């Protein structure tokens, strides 16, 4: 079973998809009663875990479900597979180029 953890990368992605700056997101959270600053959002995006009480409001401010703020071990595996795919493509291109020389 995969361990689900808050994903800083996912937060950045969701915020960017909404075309919000860190300041915009902090402002939305302040209107929901949380004293959040741009610096706080930046820290979350750098990997600091938000307090669990903020997560429902953070998700609401981004228009997503709380689960959307979480990654899993499966995400790490997918990242590794993408990196392997890029490496293999690069290797195959070099083999093809050598064959044409």
Image: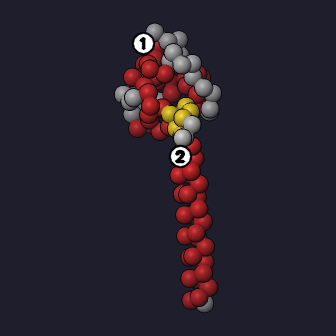
Answer above or below: position of 29 versus 4: above
Q: Which mark is residue 97?
A: none
Residue at left 55%, top 31%? Answer: 6
Q: Which mark is residue 74?
A: 2
Mark 1 residue element = loop
Numbered disc in front, either 2 or 1: 2
Residue at left 53%, top 46%? Answer: 74
Answer above or below: position of 23 versus 75: above
Task: Report, in whole angstroms, how far the alpha carbon at label 2 lies from the one at label 1.
Answer: 32 Å
Quadrant of the image containing the N terminus: top right
Quadrant of the image containing the C terminus: bottom right
Q: Residue reaching furthest left?
A: 63
Q: Which residue is mark 1?
A: 32
Relative to 72, 32 lies left or right? left
Residue at left 54%, top 63%? Answer: 85
How busy is the neighbourhood of tag 2: few (under 14 within 10 Å), some, or many (20 plus)? few
Residue 19 percent coordinates (x, y)? 40, 34
Residue at left 62%, top 85%? Answer: 98
Mark 2 residue element = helix
Ranked by sequence position, the earlier of labels 2 and 1 is 1
Residue 25 percent coordinates (x, y)? 46, 24
Residue 22 percent coordinates (x, y)? 51, 27
Q: Is residue 6 visible?
A: yes
Q: Residue reaching furthest front?
A: 1
Residue 48 percent coordinates (x, y)? 63, 27
How busy is the neighbourhood of tag 1: few (under 14 within 10 Å), some, or many (20 plus)? some
């Amino acid at each position: 079973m995969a361990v689900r953890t808050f994903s800083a990368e996912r937060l950045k992605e969701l915020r960017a998809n909404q075309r919000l700056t860190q300041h915009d997101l902090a402002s939305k959270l302040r209107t929901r009663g949380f004293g959040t600053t741009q610096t706080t959002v930046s820290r979350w995006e750098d990997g600091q875990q938000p307090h669990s009480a903020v997560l429902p409001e953070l998700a609401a401010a981004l228009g997503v479900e709380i689960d959307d703020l979480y990654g899993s071990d499966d995400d790490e595996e997918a990242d590794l597979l993408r990196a392997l795919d890029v490496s293999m493509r690069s290797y195959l291109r070099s083999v093809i180029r050598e064959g044409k020389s």
